[in-house]
Image (cartoon, grey):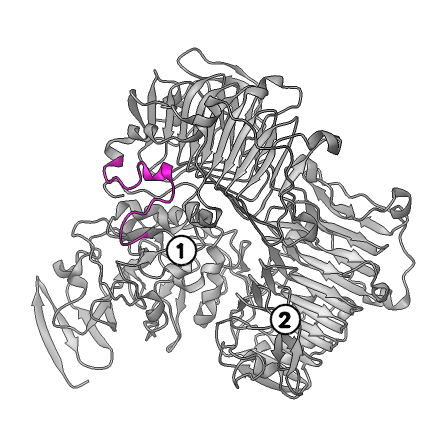
């Protein structure tokens, strides 16, 4: 360096050195100049970014957003809504929560870098906000002094502690560690990502794939414990600890990356002997593009799949690959994703057709879509025409010797793994499956008798949350299902037809909470019991939890010598949780053993000698304009309510000063409901609920026992675990706008025998059954109440009830039940997902008082994972208008006892299962000639993906009261827009 200028500021000075990377050194104590970051630091500032760049170093803005001086700012967290919405578009309850604190579009309290590895937090709505409390030193004031007029760069700070070299960034300060880790020079380091595994493992202890992905960019972060501790959440600090026979073969070898083909020696089960491309050259994918399936470009994955065989394909870096057509994998091929994160997503999947000797390892395959027929390059020959692809993740057809290991699968239009058409000698191991309906098909058709020779091993896999059925679904062949972990399937776990032999050995089956879905097994098709009782479905030393039921049949089969040789010896089922804890794609760092992460908060950090900025990584994607539309959350150009209810209040910037005006906005049969309007406003300040009989002042339960009318609001974000049902009485509003209020992991809300109630803006999820108890309610003395079934909101014998902009998911019973003579109810703008029996309107055919029930179901979104009852109706009159239905599990709308159901302007997207296309379900043993008289009307609905609405009856003659309560339907083509903000909203006081 050949230049230096010195600038005075406060009591010290800055030393500005010229060169490629400007180095600024603080030479004395705390500096006034930098007190807006934090206090008491000593250390260095490295500058690598253009002037005007905010703290997220690799995010470039077209419009520079300035925070006001004095704003409380937590720089560890994701700062600006405008940074890169692409990465949080699917996280409806995550980043938006804290926008209310920063009307200038900053949201500091969220996890700082969704732009790196958001796949891992897409379903974790409450993750980052909890982390906030672990960073006490990160609050400060930030303003445009970050971009100095005399610099062409911007700095970020490192705050040091008092002793020696020990430094951590102020971006993650307040963390003191014990074990020194030194980052190697030249390591690519993402300073805004989740940086050190020891920082806050409490919040990520159950997120196996989140933080680890960054480890490969920091090879020096693989650590050993001085005390040999084991950190059970992610990895052993005492050394490498593989969890099963397959992993034991390679994962603890630090030279695995130098001897990749040795992986072929590790396969177990029926695929034993599969070598893939072990004898061939190694081809490295450098380009994630896939533009023309017929003429692939050198450097791409498709190019590699067409090279001379055998071939072992690896990847140079993390990449996301959108396949324009299925990738046809031919014989003697390995695709090895170890050492990077490779996502196959947003396009077609992989096809192993009439091939032999294939290994697929370490890929993340998700959200696959059907693709049209086209010309595709195959093997080393000329491109050939291919038919359309159904949207399978991996399709194995007419192939043998196939091993699929350590892949993660979720989402998509068809199966995640399908093995069909006479395929055999297949092992599917160490994979993780989640959030999908038809997970794994082994045998496509009862007529495919060639599948009698099929032999498949399903071992060490984790069938995680959101899996509905087919884990696997088997036909004809012989299947060992061994040491897998099943976590609360939605319909059943293992099914089949056509006399398959299924040996289930040492698996862990955790049944769902719904009483009707406890069966592990399902025999499918119209097969008499006398016939299927002969099928050999064996329950051998499985662990059946939460009342799981395995219905055995047949006898233990006599194994052939080949079958006996291929069987994997089962471990005890009690060990399965440990055996499968690393299922799915692994984060492997070349030069080190492949280790999952763990937690001990014992780590001390020393910075690397140099860091590499990733400022160009997302620059183009991050650029936004404030006059554009941020479709996932809000318009940056102004307020755009999506339906008549929201139009009444959402665009008023003074809504928080006039909360009770919300009562003027109800539509439908709940019209006239005023809740607590006209009464006092009570602010909940305490999320606790310790004694249901003696509530504490400041709690929600205290609020519902106050003199009415009462309008209840919340001082801050809070998670409330109700120990018993919350009894809501007449003339009450619970208004969650402006904060995020979660009612979860306890009891729900009960509206019983009352009138005039509004529930708005709550997030109600994962409720539980609770026992009877003495409970305070209204203004009277506490009284005894029976147990609660676990409903989200139970409305019993009540009228004038409005439930709006709430989010519901999970729980053992209904999300909303309206029963026993309740009427004049509107359920609007709510979001429902991941639940079986969603909404019950009328509890029993014998409840004749429900003939007078009138309910409006409007502008709601019935999202992924909803199985049935959206709603299920009895007796009364129901308008179901402008709702969005997305791929139900069984049916959408059902009923008995002659309800009138007017379905108007809804959007019904049927599931892909050909047997589940019906929107409607008449329930009970009712003859067709009887239910044909029921008035179930299909009026201008949009029926997509083969959805079928079976009408009955005729358009009813409305009474004047019914006519007055009807909401005029919008065109069904507008429903996706109308419902896009369904669920609880993020509202900022002082702004629309």
User: Between residues 717 and 140, which one lies in front from this camera angle?
Assistant: 717
- Which residue is outermost to the top? 781
Q: Position of residue 346 (x, y in %)?
A: 52, 65
- Residue 94 appears at what percent x and percent y? 41, 49
Q: Nearer the viewer, residue 397 or 145?
A: 397
The reply to whether the magenta stretch includes residue 643 is yes
> Does residue 407 lie above or below 773 as drawn?
below
Q: Magenta includes 797?
A: no
Q: Residue at x 38, y 47 (%)?
A: 129
Residue drawn at x 44%, y 71% as measured from the top left: 217
The quarter of the image holding the N terminus is bottom left
Q: Main secondary structure of the magenta part?
A: loop
Query: Is residue 242 something one can see in this rendering?
Result: yes
Q: Is residue 844 above or below residue 419?
A: above
Q: Earlier in the sequence, mark 1 or mark 2?
A: 1
Q: Which residue is mark 2?
A: 350
Q: Nearer the viewer, mark 1 or mark 2?
A: 2
Instruction: Specify few, some or many for label 2: CA neighbours under 10 Å numbering under 14, 14-19, or 20 or more.
Output: many
From the viewer's side, name the closer residue of 398 and 357: 398
Q: Which span is picked out in magenta? A: 635-655
Q: Position of residue 101 (x, y in %)?
A: 27, 45
Image side of residue 950 versus residue 196, left or right: right
Quadrant of the snapshot with the C terminus: top left
**Does residue 267 appear in the picture of this structure?**
no
Vertical comparison of 833 with 335: above or below: above
Q: CA distance from mark 1 to mark 2?
A: 38 Å
Circle 1 residue: 199
Q: Residue at x 64, y 68 (%)?
A: 389
Tell me where residue 949 sits by quadrant: top right
- Left or right of residue 323, residue 538 in this image: right
The location of residue 71, given as percent across then percent down, is: 20, 49
């Amino acid at each position: 360096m050949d230049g230096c200028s010195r600038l005075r500021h406060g009591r010290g000075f800055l030393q500005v050195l010229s060169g490629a990377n400007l180095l600024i050194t603080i030479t004395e104590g705390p500096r006034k100049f930098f007190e807006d970051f934090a206090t008491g630091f000593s250390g260095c500032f490295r500058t690598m970014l253009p002037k005007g760049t905010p703290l997220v170093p690799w995010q470039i803005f077209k419009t520079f957003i300035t925070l006001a001086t004095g704003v409380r700012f937590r720089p560890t967290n994701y700062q600006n809504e405008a940074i890169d919405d692409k990465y949080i578009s699917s996280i409806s309850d995550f980043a938006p929560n804290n926008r209310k604190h920063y009307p200038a579009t900053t949201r500091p309290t969220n996890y700082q870098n969704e732009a790196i590895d958001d796949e891992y937090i897409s379903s974790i709505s409450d993750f980052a906000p909890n982390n906030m409390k672990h960073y006490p030193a990160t609050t400060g004031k930030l303003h445009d002094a970050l971009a100095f007029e005399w610099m062409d760069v911007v700095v970020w700070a490192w705050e040091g502690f008092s002793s020696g070299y020990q430094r951590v960034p102020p971006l993650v300060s307040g963390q003191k560690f014990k074990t020194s880790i030194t980052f190697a020079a030249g390591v690519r380091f993402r300073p805004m990502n989740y940086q050190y595994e020891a920082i806050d493992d409490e919040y990520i202890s159950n997120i196996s794939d989140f933080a680890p992905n960054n480890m490969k960019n920091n090879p020096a972060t693989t650590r050993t414990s001085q005390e040999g501790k084991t950190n059970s959440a992610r990895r052993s600090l005492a050394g490498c600890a593989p969890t099963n026979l397959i992993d034991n073969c390679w994962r603890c070898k630090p030279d695995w990356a130098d001897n990749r083909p040795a992986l072929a020696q590790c396969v177990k089960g029926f695929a034993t002997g599969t070598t893939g491309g072990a004898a061939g050259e190694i081809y490295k994918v450098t380009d994630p593009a896939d533009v023309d399936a017929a003429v692939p470009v050198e450097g791409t994955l498709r190019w590699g799949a067409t090279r001379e065989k055998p071939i072992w394909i690896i990847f140079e870096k993390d990449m996301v690959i959108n396949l324009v057509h299925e990738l046809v994998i031919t014989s003697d091929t390995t695709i090895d994703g170890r050492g990077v994160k490779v996502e196959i997503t947003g396009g077609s999947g992989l096809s192993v057709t009439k091939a032999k000797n294939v290994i697929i390892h370490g890929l993340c395959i998700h959200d696959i879509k059907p693709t049209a027929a086209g010309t595709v390059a195959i093997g080393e020959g000329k491109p050939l025409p291919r038919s359309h692809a159904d949207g399978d993740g991996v399709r194995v057809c007419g192939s043998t010797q196939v091993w699929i290991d350590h892949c993660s699968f979720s989402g998509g239009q068809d199966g995640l793994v399908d093995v069909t058409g006479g395929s055999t000698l297949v092992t599917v191991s160490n994979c993780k499956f989640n959030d999908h309906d038809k997970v794994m098909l082994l045998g496509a058709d009862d007529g495919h008798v060639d599948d009698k020779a099929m032999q498949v091993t399903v071992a060490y896999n984790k069938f995680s949350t959101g899996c509905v059925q087919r884990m696997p679904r088997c036909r004809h062949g012989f299947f060992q299902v061994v040491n897998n972990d099943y976590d609360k399937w939605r319909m059943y776990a293992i099914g089949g037809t056509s006399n398959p032999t299924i040996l289930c050995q040492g698996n862990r089956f955790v049944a769902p909470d719904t009483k009707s879905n406890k069966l592990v097994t399902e025999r499918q098709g119209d097969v008499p019991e006398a016939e299927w009782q002969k099928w050999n479905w064996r329950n051998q030393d499985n662990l059946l939890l939460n009342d799981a039921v395995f219905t055995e049949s047949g006898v233990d089969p006599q194994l052939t010598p080949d079958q006996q040789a291929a069987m994997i010896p089962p471990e005890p089922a009690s060990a399965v949780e440990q055996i499968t804890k690393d299922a799915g794609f692994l984060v492997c760092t070349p030069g080190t053993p492949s280790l999952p992460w763990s937690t001990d908060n014992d780590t001390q950090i020393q910075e690397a000698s140099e860091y590499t900025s990733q400022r160009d990584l997302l620059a183009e994607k991050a650029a936004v304009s404030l006059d554009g539309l941020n479709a996932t959350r809000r318009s940056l150009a102004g307020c755009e309510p999506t339906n008549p209810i929201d139009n009444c209040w959402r665009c008023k910037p003074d809504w928080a000063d006039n909360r009770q005006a919300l009562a003027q906005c109800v539509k439908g049969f709940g019209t006239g409901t005023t809740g607590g309007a006209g009464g006092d406003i009570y602010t909940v300040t305490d999320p606790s609920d310790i004694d249901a009989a003696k509530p504490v002042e400041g709690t929600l339960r205290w609020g519902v026992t106050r003199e009415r009318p009462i309008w209840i609001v919340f001082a801050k974000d809070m998670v409330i675990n109700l120990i018993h049902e919350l009894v809501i009485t007449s003339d009450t509003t619970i208004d969650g706008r402006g904060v995020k209020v979660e009612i979860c992991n306890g009891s729900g809300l009960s509206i019983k025998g009352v009138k005039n109630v509004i529930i708005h803006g709550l997030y109600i999820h994962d409720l539980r059954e609770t026992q009877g108890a003495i409970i305070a309610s209204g203004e009277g003395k506490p009284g005894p109440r029976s147990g609660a079934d676990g409903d989200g909101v139970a409305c019993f014998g009540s009228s004038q009830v409005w439930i709006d902009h709430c989010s519901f998911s999970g729980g053992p019973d209904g999300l909303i039940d309206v029963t026993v003579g309740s009427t004049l109810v509107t359920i609007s703008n709510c979001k429902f997902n991941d639940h079986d029996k969603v909404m019950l309107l009328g509890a029993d055919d014998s409840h004749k008082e429900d003939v007078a029930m009138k309910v409006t179901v409007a502008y709601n979104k019935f999202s992924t994972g909803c199985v049935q009852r959206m709603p299920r109706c009895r007796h009364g009159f129901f308008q179901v208008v402008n709702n969005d239905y997305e791929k139900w599990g069984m049916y959408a709308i059902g009923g008995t006892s002659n309800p009138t159901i007017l379905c108007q302007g809804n959007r019904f997207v049927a599931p892909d299962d050909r047997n589940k296309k019906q929107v409607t379900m008449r329930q009970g043993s009712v003859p067709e000639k009887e239910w044909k008289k029921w008035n179930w009307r299909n009026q201008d609905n949009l029926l997509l993906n083969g959805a079928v609405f079976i009408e009955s009856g005729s358009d009813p003659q409305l009474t004047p009261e019914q006519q007055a309560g009807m909401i005029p339907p919008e065109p069904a083509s507008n429903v996706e827009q109308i419902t896009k903000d369904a669920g609880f909203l993020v509202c900022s006081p002082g702004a629309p």
